[in-house]
């Protein structure tokens, strides 16, 4: 049982480049989330998916797109990276019913130059 | 004003001391989470509670729904407890709202 996995762990991009962060969970969870964590800001929700086939914006969605490929996988895409997107990105999942714990991936440290 | 406020923001203590971290929130909630994040590390769920008190080893979490307040206690603190502790609340939809975190340092 791997839990929540994320790739890559580290990435450096130049301004304007694009990339996709991958996330997968093997706990059969319905809900999946993408957060960013910046110093002094706490965790902020970018997008979430309450179930396969649905996605919703969170607190800071601008500059990002997501795809819930299937129940296991939820990817985050930066179409044209900007220095303001330098951050640590965490994927998470949660069981059904909204009463479960959230399980977090190990994080992706992204630097945009 | 943030929906979830933690205090203190930073806490340094000596090994063995009793630690208390506080979390206040301003919205109705269905559950409150305490999370732990070690330096450079991932985020681990410690507790999820909607009422009363939970205990796991040396960690105790309490919540007072009427006062919109939760506390995380660590008994007999150890340097390995040094981490950032994050409070998060769920209010309705399947989303969490996070506090800023409390950075705890336990000196030997």
Image: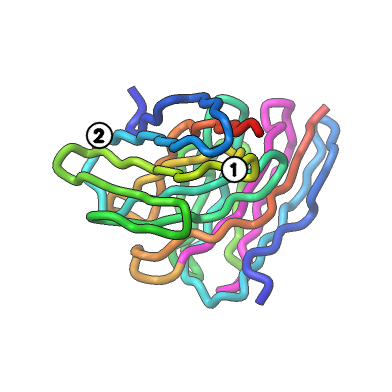
Percent of width and height locating residue A38: 61, 31
Q: Is residue A92 magenta?
A: yes
Q: Give whichever of discs 1 and 2 has the lower sequence position.
A: 2
Of A97 and A85, nearer the camera is A97
At mark 2, the secondary structure is loop
Answer left or right for A26 relative to A108. Answer: left
Up/down of B77 relative to B42, above or below: above
* Residue carrying label 2: B26
Name the quarter where the N terminus of chain B is drawn.
Answer: top left
Answer left or right for B68 relative to A3. Answer: left
Q: Residue at x 41, y 48 (%)?
A: B96
Mark 1–mark 2 Cα distance, whole angstroms, equals 32 Å
Answer left or right for A111 relative to B46. Answer: right
The color scheme shown is rainbow
Name the quarter where the C terminus of chain B is drawn.
Answer: top right
Tell me, for residue B78, which label it has, or none: 1
Residues shaded magenta? A70-94
Query: What chain does badge 2 belong to?
Result: B
Q: Residue at x 44, y 62 (%)?
A: A101
Query: What chain does badge 1 belong to?
Result: B
Q: Is residue A52 visible?
A: yes
Q: Residues within 10 Å of mark 2 (few under 14, many from 20)?
A: some
Percent of width and height locating residue B82: 61, 38
Disc tally is 2
């Amino acid at each position: 049982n791997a839990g929540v996995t994320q790739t890559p762990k580290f990435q450096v991009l130049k301004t304007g480049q694009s990339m996709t962060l991958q996330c997968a969970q093997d706990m059969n969870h319905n809900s999946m989330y993408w957060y960013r964590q910046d110093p002094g800001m706490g965790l902020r929700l970018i997008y979430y998916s309450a179930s396969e086939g649905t996605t919703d914006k969170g607190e800071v969605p601008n500059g990002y797109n997501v795809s819930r490929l299937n129940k296991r996988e939820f990817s985050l895409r930066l179409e044209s990276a900007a220095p303001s997107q330098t951050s640590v990105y965490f994927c998470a999942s949660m069981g059904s019913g909204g009463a479960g714990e959230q399980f977090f991936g190990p994080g992706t440290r992204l630097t945009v130059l | 004003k943030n929906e979830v406020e933690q205090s203190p923001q930073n806490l340094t203590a000596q090994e063995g001391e009793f630690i208390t971290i506080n979390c206040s929130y301003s919205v109705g909630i269905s559950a409150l989470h305490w999370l732990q994040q070690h330096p450079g590390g991932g985020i681990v769920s410690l507790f999820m509670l909607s009422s009363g008190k939970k205990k796991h080893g040396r960690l105790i979490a309490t919540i007072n729904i009427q006062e919109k307040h939760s506390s995380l206690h660590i008994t007999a603190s150890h340097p390995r407890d040094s981490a950032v502790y994050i409070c998060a609340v769920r209010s309705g939809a399947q989303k969490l709202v996070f506090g800023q975190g409390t950075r705890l340092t336990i000196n030997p």
